[in-house]
Amino acid sequence: MEPILTLDDVSYRYEDTLALGGIRLEIGSRELVGILGPNGSGKSTLLKLMDGLLKPESGTVFFSGRPIGAFKRSELARRIAFVAQEQPFQFSFTVLEVVLMGRSPHLKRLQFESDRDIEIAMQALRTVDVERLADRSIHELSGGEKQRVLIARALAQEPEIILLDEPTAFLDIKYKMEIFELIASLVRDKQVSVVAVTHDIDLAALYCNRLIILENGRLFSAGAPAEVVTSEGISAAYSCRVLVDRNPATGAPRVSLVGRAERCAESQACAEA
Ligand code: ADP
Ligand code: MG
């Protein structure tokens, strides 16, 4: 099947900083891809290029087989949903109003939402299990609830792909897991692809079909979670000593911070890390 997104030798520069260089990758349809990498490695920039918000300095981003630059912004807004990291709401919108914003790319100019749009928005809230919050102000939600509402807004767009920038940041462990469960269920049941930037390496390794690590603007590694999440790979990409073994309950790769060498309980494991 044709990939939904293809990055062909893509580079991007902010004035004097080369943020990404020579990125080649494909996102398949109905794939859940996790993007890992240290702070400043280019993850958010990569998502913005995938959404067509930024134009590459060189190389081409293809969406559904066509250069993304050839699409009208309005068409991309219907087909790609982007949940950015910072989502300040200046006004005290209700949750339903926020989710209805996801319908706006489907409306004609000056057209109001129809009953069908409201039904789609309510269905999106049901999917992420926060229907009960529909009339609540967006400012009166916990971090986990707000993240669900933002994912509901993305779903209301009825996109082919959802790009999520650190959807699990600031959430407690249960909410982090639930967000990953939710994302995985969307890929399974809603025929969407999801690309999620995250620092939760263990959860990404458990739930994603494929992982990509960026390091200093380059594609450091890509592949199945067990190929990418290794002691050597994670230690080198994050410049930090870690030990990767298997989570005994799930079999997925598990990252343990080793700390300084003198803190190693088992010097053999530490030497291998
Ligand atoms: P990440 O999301 O992995 O933390 P970013 O994509 O935000 O990384 O940033 C990659 C690099 O580009 C960093 O060096 C960052 O400082 C730089 N950068 C990001 N946004 C801008 C900007 N608007 N102007 C200038 N430099 C930027
Ligand atoms: Mg970022």
Image (tube, rainbow, N blue to C red):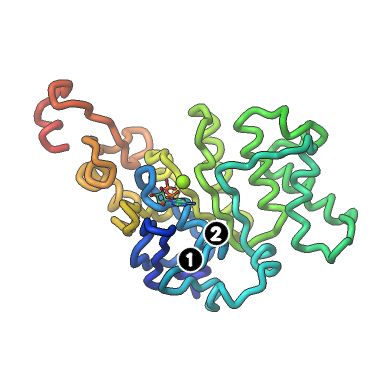
Quarter containing the C terminus: top left
Identify the residue at horizontal 55%, vertical 54% (top origin).
Answer: 163
Q: Nearer the viewer, residue 21 or 100?
A: 21
Residue wearing tag 2 = 193
Query: Is 104 on the left-hand or right-hand side of 196?
Result: right
- Percent of width and height locating residue 109: 85, 65
- Percent of width and height locating residue 210: 40, 55
Q: Amino acid at mark 2?
A: Ser
Question: Cβ–Cβ below 8 Å for labels 2 and 1?
Answer: yes
Per the model, the C-alpha gap separating discs 2 and 1 is 7 Å
Describe the element under mark 1 as helix, strand or loop: loop
Describe the element under mark 2 as helix, strand or loop: strand
Judge whether 239 appears above or below 227 on screen. above
Tell me the number on the disc at residue 210. Answer: none
Instruction: Work out whether mark 2 precedes mark 1 in sequence or the reverse, and give the earlier one.
Output: 1
Identify the residue at horizontal 56%, vertical 74% (top origin).
Answer: 69
